[in-house]
Image (cartoon, rainbow, N blue to C red):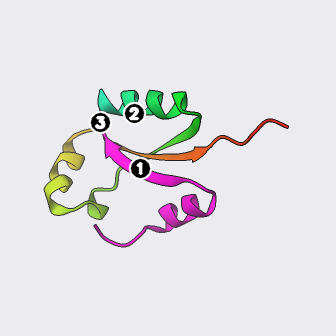
């Protein structure tokens, strides 16, 4: 994998942690799991140029998203 993109750095500063990239149906399953564990979930478009060579081709042809999570902030 290449270096972090400016967008990924921005998300990291906001407390988001990059998990992994997936397509359906695993994408929805992972989102549901993280939410059930009490995390906020953000989906970002997968960027093929940031993936390793083995994954790059699939990212070009499938609707993949990168999953970011962060703990939910407690209600005040």
Tell me: 14 left or right of 30: right
The residue wearing badge 2 is: 30
What is the quadrant of residue 10 in the picture?
Answer: bottom right
Q: Which span is picked out in magenta?
A: 1-22
- The local secondary structure at tag 3 comes to loop
Q: Which mark is residue 41?
A: none
Residue 8 place in picture, x, y as percent: 48, 62
Vertical arrangement, residue 8 with respect to residue 43, above or below: below
Vertical arrangement, residue 73 with respect to residue 15, above or below: above
Residue pushed farthest bottom? 3
Rounded to the nearest angstrom, the CA distance separating label 2 from label 3 is 10 Å
The residue wearing badge 1 is: 19
Sequence-first disc among 1 and 2: 1
Q: Bin the neighbour count of mark 1 within 10 Å (Cα to Cα): few under 14, some 14-19, many 20 and up.
A: few
Quadrant in which the C terminus is drawn: top right
Q: Is residue 16 magenta?
A: yes
Q: Nearer the viewer, mark 2 or mark 3?
A: 2
């Amino acid at each position: 994998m290449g270096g972090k993109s400016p967008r990924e750095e921005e998300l990291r500063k906001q407390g988001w942690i990059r998990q992994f990239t997936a397509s359906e149906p695993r994408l929805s399953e992972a989102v549901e799991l993280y939410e059930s564990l009490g995390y906020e979930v953000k989906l970002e478009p997968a960027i093929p140029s940031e993936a390793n060579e083995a994954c790059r081709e699939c990212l070009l042809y499938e609707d993949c998203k990168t999953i970011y999570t962060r703990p939910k902030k407690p209600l005040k």
